[in-house]
Structures are given as structure tokens and as C-alpha cells.
Image (cartoon, rainbow, N blue to C red):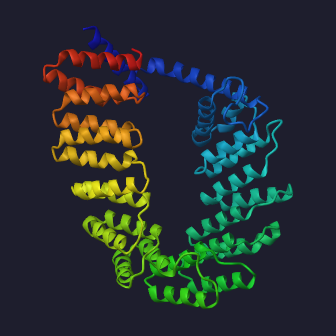
Amino acid sequence: MFLSTALLLLRLSRKSQQNPNFRISISKPITFRSLQTLTTKLKHLNNVENESNTSSRGGGVSNDDYFAAIHHISNIVRRDFFLERTLQRMQINVTSELVFRVLRSCNKSGIESFRFFNWARNQSKYEPTTLEYEELIKTLGRTRNWDTMWKVAEQMKKQEFCLTPETFSMIIESYGRHGLTDRAVEVFNRMKDFNCEQTTQVYNSLLFALCEVKNFQGAYALIRRLIRKGGVPDKKTYSILVNGWCSSGKLKEAQQFLEEMSRKGFNPPVRGRDLLIDGLLNAGYLESAKGLVRKMTKEGYLPDISTFNSLLEAICNSGEIEFSIELLRDVCKLGLTPDITTYKTMIPAASKLGKLDEAFRLLHCSIEDGHKPFPSLYAPIIKALFRNGQFDDAFSFFNDMKVQGHPPNRPVYTMLIKMCARGGRFFEAANYLIEMTELNLAPRTQNFDMVTDGLKNCGEHDLAKRIEELEISLCGA
């Protein structure tokens, strides 16, 4: 009787935490105390002289307290209509680190971030730095508040702060994503007014903007200008243009561009065919990419491993898992060495299809290659064994992986408990639940309910009582 009452009280308390409208009479004082605590900790934190030390912020304030305070302020900036008044009442000692972190946390709230920055500038002992200005400019550009963004940029210029090429790249790309190519070109040309160098990264951003509106003639002219100015195209330069042509179905033009650049002595950092495969995949032309890889393998050529992994992932996502298994075998015969990304793609795919022999083969290959199995590698195999009704094999394999692989995490144990319960193996589910708590992994409430109900139905009342006591002890009821 005592256990049932304790569990009922425990679940009622959880309900009150999850639902703010539940037991309204106590929710407001708790919120007030939480706000007061966070504010006090933040005041104490901002008095610490060494702000850059993230491992120990002084005064007994932990990292969890610090970031909880940042999160609280960020919520005020995003949601409070009278955010300046609320922040002023908190009496925060504003620092550069605080402003930067809040701006970065509110990177989807342009005008609200601008209001927060203006409020911070009016606080004593705070002088904005380039970091905060650039973070605000990025946020305003990302949220399409371009007029406000340029006002902030002009403020930077008056204070003799310099905008970096990375910030200009972001601004140009934000215009390009919304089809405002003329504005992107204008920003590119205005860089000299801010004494900012037009780097390859900036050229790539404008190239992206031109390709977004299918202006390939202008894009190719921009690359010629980059070369004429002494710049060197990088992998992204080639990828942007090839992806643009492939998305328009112009594979021939993409090939001609790569051949012409090669004749001029500007070979891409990766092979041209790999760029074409990536371009076709990004454009959604999976069959064309598969055909190009088939042609390469017949001619004895191998794709780059990162390109091949992208192809495998796309094929598996389309449901053609058997084809991806055969393709992997073919390229391995030609000498391609899979990496850990290959195994992370193929082992779950083979397990999901029920190809356990292939999944085990790939897992053993990964171990022979020196990769210690991650939970994401062996968990799909365990789940497939459960689905086949091979419970004893699953238990044995899991014990082997605890020795040979990385330690199992919370999702693995949750899956084990759920699959055991579905198969009526409640005794084993209870053992995994206890083992999970011994590793300081907190089970979900549903896990406890599932196991205790199952044990009671099986007549294991003593073990069910022990599981209930364990749940109460973990939650401090």
C-alpha cells in the first residue's frame, strides 16, 4: 500500500512539472524562485574576472548554472514583449561573453536580438567587440532584416571595427537564398568600402547566389575573374557550379567545365567524376548517379570513399538496400576500403532488411579494420535478432559487445527492455533495468511501468516490488 501511494505521488509530481496548468497554486512561486536563483547566480558569475575560463567560472558557480542563466536570458529575449524592462529589473552585469552567447542562442530572432544588443550597449562597463557585432549581423541577415543589418554594419565602420570575409560571405549567401542576386552583387562590390578582402570564400558565396537563379554564364565569368585576380578555386568552387548544373539537368556542361578547368591547370582537389556524382545526388538524380558509378567500376575506376558513402546513404534511404550491398561488394573487390561511415550506413540497413549474415560480416570487417563497435553499430543487429525471435542469441551477442565494443548507452538499454517486454521476457527486462541503473543511466517511467506490470502478470510479485522500490529510490520519493 505504501509503495502504491508513493508511486502515485511521484507520478502526480511529474505531471505537475510537465503540465504548467496542473496545480496552478504552486507553479507561480516555483517559477519566481527559479528566476531569482538564476539571476543571483548570473550576477555572481559576471563579477568573475576571468570570463574565458569555461572549466571553472569561479565563486562555486558550475557550468550548468552558467548555461542555465544564459538559456533563461535567451528565452526572455525571444519571448518577452517588454524584454528591456525585464532585463533591467534583473540588474545583470553585462559582459562581452554574455552578450555573444545570448546573441548566438537567439540566432533566429533578428529584431529581438537587435533590441537586446541595444539594451546591452546602454549598460555601464560594457563595450561591444567585433564578435558581438558580427554575430548580430549574421542573425539579422539570416532573418532577412537587411536594412537593420546595414545600420549595424555602419555602426561598426564608425567605431573602426572591421568586418571579416566570413561575415560578408554569410550576407551574400543570405541574399542568394532568397533570389536577390543584384543585392548580393552589390554587397560583393561594397566590400572595398569596409576594407575587406575578397577571398575565395566570398567568391564562392556570390557563385552560390548566381547558381541559385541559374545564371551559369555569370557564374563562369565570376570564376574567370577569380583566376584573373590571382585567386585559386577550391573544392567548394567546383562543387557549387557542378551542383548547379546537375540540378538543372546539364550534366554535359558540368563535364565540359571540369575538362576546361583541367586544361587550364586548375584541377579540382577531388576527381571530377566524384564531383559529378555528388552533384547528381544533391540534385536528386539517384539513378544517374548509380549509372555513373556502374560505368566507373566497369572501367576499373573507384569513387572517392566520401562520395561512395553519400551514394550508399542515398540508395539505402530509397529502399534499395540489396543493391547497395551488392555495390559495396563490387567496389571492395576492386580495392576500395570502407571506413567507419560506410559501416554506420550499411550495418543498420542490412539489419533492418533482415540480412543478419551480411550485418555480422560487416561488423566483423569493421573490427578487423581496427574500429571498436559503437552502440549504433551493434544495436540494430540486436534488434533484428529480437525480431527473429532469437532472444538467447541477442543476449549472448550483447554480452560480447559489452566486452569488445564501446559501452552501451541509454537508447540501447531502452531498446533491450522494450524488446524483452514485447517478447514476454520480463525477467530479463528487469535485469537490464537494474543493470542500467547501476551504470547511472536513468530509465524512463514507461520502462518501469512496462516491467512491473509484466512481472505482476507473470506472478513475480517480489521482483515487481523490488523494481517499484528502485523507481522510488531513484526519484527521491
Residue at the far left: name it. Answer: 458
| Residue 188 on image: x %, y % | 71, 73
Q: Nearer the viewer, residue 54 or 6?
A: 54
Q: Quick one: quadrant of the C terminus?
A: top left
Residue 334 in sight = yes
Q: Quadrant of the N terminus?
A: top left
Q: Would you say residue 209 is visible in this rendering?
A: no
**Which residue is the extreme one toward the top?**
2
Q: Is residue 467 above or below residue 49?
A: above
Residue drawn where x is 59% and y is 87% of the image: 262
Q: Position of residue 249 (x, y in %)?
A: 43, 83
**309 left or right of 330 in image:** right
Q: Residue at x 73, y 28 (%)?
A: 91
Residue 335, quarter of picture: bottom left
Which residue is drawn at the image coordinates 29% and 66% (left, top)? 325
Q: How many marks?
A: 0
Q: Residue at x 27, y 34 (%)?
A: 417
Percent position (x, y) of residue 159? 86, 54
In the image, residue 431 above or below residue 179: above
Q: Quadrant of residue 472?
A: top left
In front here: 342 or 256?
A: 342
Q: Position of residue 55 (x, y in %)?
A: 66, 34
> Is 350 placed above or below 406 here?
below
In the picture as drawn, the residue positioned furthest to the front comes out as: 368
Location of residue 319 by image quarter: bottom left
Q: Is residue 117 above or below residue 259?
A: above
